[in-house]
Image (cartoon, rainbow, N blue to C red):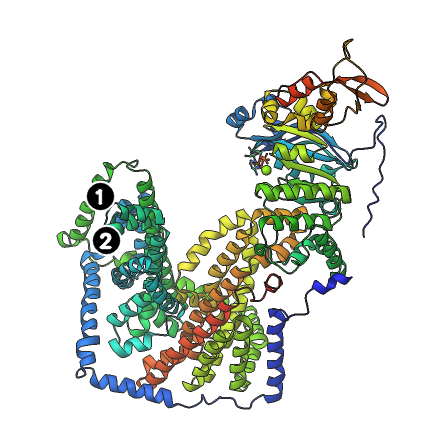
Amino acid sequence: MTVLVAAPGLRRPSRGVLVGAVLAAWLLLFVALRGQFTLSAGGPTVVPTWLQHLKDGADGQRNTSPLFLYGFNEIRVAIDPLFTNVQGFFLRLGWLGCTVLAAALGLVFAGWRMMLLALAGFLAFGVLGLFGESMDTLALTLTSVLIALVIGIPLGIVAGNSDRFQQVLTPVLDLMQILPTFAYLPLITLCFLIGPASAVIATVIYAAPPVIRLTSAGIRNVAPATTEASRSLGATRWQTVRHVQLPMAKRTIVLGINQTMMAALSMATITALIDAPGLGKTVLKALSREDVGAAFDAGLCIVILAVVLDRVTTAASQRAADIGRSGRATSVTARPAIALLALVAVVVAAQLPRLTARVSLLFPDGWVHPIRPAVNTASRWIELHLFSTTEAIKNGVTYRLINPLQTLLGDSPWWLLVLVVAALGYVLSGVRIALAAAGCLVGLPLLGLWPSGMITLASTLVGAVSAMVIGVVVGVWTGRNDLADRILRPFLDAGQTMPAFVYLIPGLALFGATRFTGIVAGVIYASPVVIKVVNEGIRDVSPSTIEAAVASGSTPWQVITKVQLPMARPHLLLAFNQGVIYVLAAVIVAGLVGGGGLGLDVINGFSQVSLAGTGLAAGIGIVLLGIMLDRITQGAGRRRAGSDVALGAH
Amino acid sequence: MTTVTAAATVVAGTATAEPVISVRDLWKIFGPGASRVVGSPDADLSRAELRRRTGCTAAVRRLSFDVARREVFVVMGLSGSGKSTLVRCLTRLVEPTAGQVLFEGEDVRGMDDRRLRELRRRKFAMVFQNFGLLPHRRVLDNVSYGLEIRGAGKPERYARAQEVIDLVGLQGYETAYPDQLSGGMQQRVGLARALAVDPDVLLFDEPFSALDPLIRRGMQDEVIRLHHEVGKTMLFITHDLSEALKLGDRILIMRDGELVQCGTPDQLVGAPADDYVRDFVRDVAKSHVLTLRWIVRRVTPQDALDGPELSPDVVIRDAVRQVIQAGRPVKVVENGALLGVVDSAGILGVIAAEPQGDPP
Ligand SMILES: Nc1ncnc2c1ncn2[C@@H]1O[C@H](COP(=O)(O)OP(=O)(O)OP(=O)(O)O)[C@@H](O)[C@H]1O
Ligand SMILES: [Mg+2]
């Protein structure tokens, strides 16, 4: 038994124990100090007041200050017509022209299946009575994607070639992506007013990171030997980029474009809050009236638009790659013919309304059959018959989970919470993260947003933990079962491309306008990502390790708990990190439907001039909360320092 | 310490003790409709032909052999000859398609999940080519994994793990993580993990192929030492002939899933069954493997019989000096009976790599 000298327990206790200790200490202090040092009034209002002044000042100087005259206003004036032109183009094309154009593009670039998909999708917009709105959203999305690509691809190329630039860029991109879409809307409207220009800019900010990242990654993946060979032949830098790097990185870049497009669509719907036209606005109006049916129609259009854009661009990139690989295998001669035919069809379709009165620019009224009445009937039926069930679920979670957590967060002395966050940050990742996270949290009382922040935080934590539970169960299942994975994957892929907005609609139908609805939406929104990351982690475990465990006589449960989950730990932490970020985004949006918290502050800031300062502050508060949650959950991923003590000692 | 109390029943009609593992007519066919192939005319097709016709791969075909207690039994063959599949069939990590696998007389294929797990937990332990260590666990926890899953308490399993860690010479690295160790050390962890559960049989699937030659030799010596110390039955897979000759009491050579030859090292080298085996053993220094039994010749009247005596089981290499120095024929005597003589011409013949004679 002398061997126990080497056994653990003598050094620092494990992280789990430390986290438990921090939480236990928090509970004890909470019981002792409950209700003292709280900031139920919100804390000092200096910053919001100052922000309000800033806003008023900005409004006053909009036509005098050079910053506005030669800066922001110029940008706005440049972007506005860009959008209106695209929008106008779709208008002049008419519904038939748009539909045929979409089908033609699908056919030429992605094959006849995608043509059918595009055709069906565009007809569905019309049938649901939302053709114009859909085209507005599409116009907004495409304008933003265009700008995002014009800016993003060159940035990606530079970042791919320069380590220094990449290092500077990465944290900025990280920040752009973890920020919930709501966060920067107030700031953008401060500079660019409410309207399409702000909508486009906000969308570009949210949508550009994927294409920048993936362009850089694609270029970095080109084997150094290839680049070197090109240089050795005397190619200039630009020639190397143009003839070697870009062609070889094409697939990755196209993937980035696809992701940028999906992100843009998601953001474009949300910019309805700052008066951007389109489907988002329809959803917004319907949500505020709690008209589930109308929201459903618009939500469905968003889903269809997402599916069409995603599938067509994916198929197009797949095809481009296949053709690229097989040289001229696919009949090159047939394609120009098809393209020409498609072009003729589009021109004819666009001219038809001008030639005959029987075809209108607008989708024929007689064909419009929204499903709104049916949905509302169903929704009423649910209200009538499932009310007790949904109420029970809602109340159960609200009273057992959300309220206690909110009490714990809200009734703790604010400094205690800051200490807890600092301690967790320190235990999980060290001093720097601890300081950063605690610093972010201290920002909330300074902004006068403590109570709203705590509401948002409580909802986010409950949602993230729920999403994680679902994610681990389903992720482990699909990770171990190929059939389940194959069946589920398309749904997850589709689910991931939907804007958070859309998920509020079923939540609203089932649970009415409450905090709980926001959490449900957040869980649905976050689950696909969490499931996928967990699944990947489980599948990453090498088969030989599993085989070794099975050969030792492990039961399936032992394989999961002792081998697969522990080995997937980095993935699990990443999944939780992503879950938190996604749920936060959805919970903020849920301010629209009774979610309260910071999201509501932002929305109020748009609707009431006197609250604009609070709205701006809330935007900053969301940023702080997002960074805090991200830092803490991200740092936990690394293996504890000091595990190599044994080796160092020799 | 767990003691193994397997009743060693003696099968009627066999004089020797019952083999630990007994494989009879074993088949493993990968692919759709695999079970229909065995017993049909397709079964006699060559592997490539079968694959072309049915899309199935016959990884193991019609294989039968026994492994005796405490024996080191080596399975050898080129890449793809079905060695890994064979060894996985023994504990049903790969489900056999047809045939019989007996462990101490018990039909492994008839076992239910629970019994099979019991078998894997207590009777067999395996060492893998790519180690199969758990990267998130320290060496100590890797080694005690087998004990942990069968429910041993922490003090007990750490005590046992420490014993085997000492045995394989890893003391001082208990708290290291696998990726902090060299390949050779990682495989020692794999070895310790297998030894920790005190199994009846150790299965090695090319455990040293991923190691460089010098470390490999060290590890082979280690296995030999462990075999002397713990005396386990070992089934050792390799595609390296020198490793097979060094470790094996008996060697089974496979080709395309089939048995080509099974015998002691000197039988393989001295009397290869066909060109495949002959090719395998061509580069072996025969004098290192063959015994005097393989070059002993009849006594002729000219031979002077006053030279020294040697046993027929002496390896030629070890007899070279004596025979050459003797300057006359050396008598080969087994149990007092004169088998014949060996002279320097015979020995030089072997060293010049020319196969001599047939086994007596
Ligand atoms: N899971 C599987 N599915 C289909 N075929 C398989 C599978 N596993 C092995 N095979 C095939 O069975 C044959 C034998 O493979 P096996 O891995 O047993 O060979 P091996 O002798 O261990 O080779 P190596 O020395 O390369 O490890 C090969 O032709 C292989 O392609
Ligand atoms: Mg193998």
Give the crowd class for mark 2: few <14, some 14-19, many >=20 residues within 10 Å.
few
Eyeballing the image, is B124 above or below B308? Answer: below
Some atom of ligand 1 lies within 8 Å of the CB belonging to the residue at label 2: no
Q: Of discs 2 and 1, which sits in the foreground?
A: 2
Quadrant of the drawing holding the C terminus of chain B: top right
The quarter holding residue B9 reads: top right
Kindly state the secondary structure of the residue where label 1 is placed: helix
Taking B223 as reference, is B82 left or right? left
Label 2: element kind: helix
Which residue corresponds to mark 1? Answer: A339
Q: Mark 2 points at which residue?
A: A238
Q: Which chain does the residue under circle 2 lie in?
A: A
Q: Nearer the viewer, residue B220 or A497?
A: B220
Residue B148 placement (x, y as % from top left): 71, 56
Q: Please report the residue visible at 17 percent of the width from the left and 78 percent of the height from the top.
A: A69
Q: Tell me if A69 is positioned left or right of A6 in this view.
A: left
> How many marks are shown on the rendered structure?
2
Residue at 35%, 62% (x, y): give it: A263
Instruction: Check disc 1 and give the amino acid type.
Output: Ala
* Residue A489 against residue A169 in the figure, above or below: above
Residue B201 appears at what percent x and percent y?
A: 74, 41
Q: Is residue B312 left or right of residue A161?
A: right
Q: Quadrant of ligand 2?
A: top right
**Amino acid at pointer 2:** Trp
- Percent across and percent down for residue B106 are 78, 37
Q: Which of A193 and B347 is in front in this view?
A: B347
Distance from Cα at disc 2 to Cα at disc 1: 32 Å
